[in-house]
Amino acid sequence: MSAPEDAKALLPPPLFAEGFPRDPALDALVDAFARGDYARVRREAPKLLATAESDPLAVVLLALTGVLLVVLTAWWWRFNGPGPTPPRPQIVEHVKG
């Protein structure tokens, strides 16, 4: 290996990746990103994304949030809605003669 390649191999992971879960495939992509191998990242990231699973709790909470939004909107519309539009006051002009 040449000196620039050695320096790239010793780079610490990017700061944004500190909170990522430990996974060999993800670690390899983060390492490739840190080294500047963006072609590999673009090629392998969709494969890694296809294997990812969503958190069941997050899905349930998102669905409950949607239901709550619909229920509260319907409740407001039924009981406190915008109501009738108040009539506009008549404009009266006083002519001094």
Image: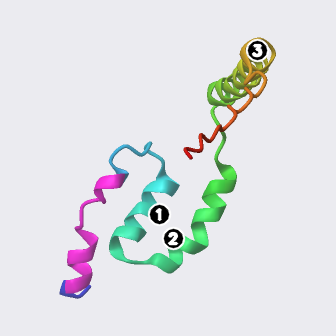
Query: Please, is residue 96 above or below residue 86 in the view?
Result: below
Q: Label 3: state its secondary structure.
A: helix
Report, in whole angstroms, how far the alpha carbon at label 1 lies from the one at label 3.
48 Å
Query: N-terminal of the two: label 1 or label 3?
Result: 1
The image quarter containing residue 91 is top right
Most frequent secondary structure within the magenta stretch: helix
Is 9 included in the stretch rendered in magenta? yes
- Residue 15: percent from left, percent from top: 28, 55
Of mark 2 and mark 3, the one earlier in the sequence is: 2
Q: What residue type is labelled 2?
A: Val
Q: Position of residue 95 (x, y in %)?
A: 59, 44
Element on which disc 1 rests: helix
> Considering depth in this image, is 85 or 82 the residue closer to the camera?
85
Give the residue number, with chain letter if any, for mark 1.
29
The answer to whether the residues at label 1 and label 2 have Cβ atoms under 8 Å apart is: yes
Give percent across and percent down for residue 48.
Answer: 61, 57
For discs 2 and 3, the disc positioned in front in the rendered view: 3
Residue 69 on the magenta segment? no
- As drawn, 12 above or below 59: below
| Residue pointed to by mark 2 | 41
As shown in the figure, which amino acid type bears the numbered disc 1? Leu
Q: In the image, which residues are magenta?
A: 4-16
Give the CA distance from mark 2 to mark 3.
48 Å
**Left or right: residue 51 compared with residue 28:** right
Q: Which residue is drawn at 48% across and 52% down?
A: 24
Q: Nearer the viewer, residue 2 or 67?
A: 67
- What is the crowding at mark 2: few (fewer than 14 residues within 10 Å), some, or many (at least 20)? some
Q: Quadrant of the N terminus?
A: bottom left
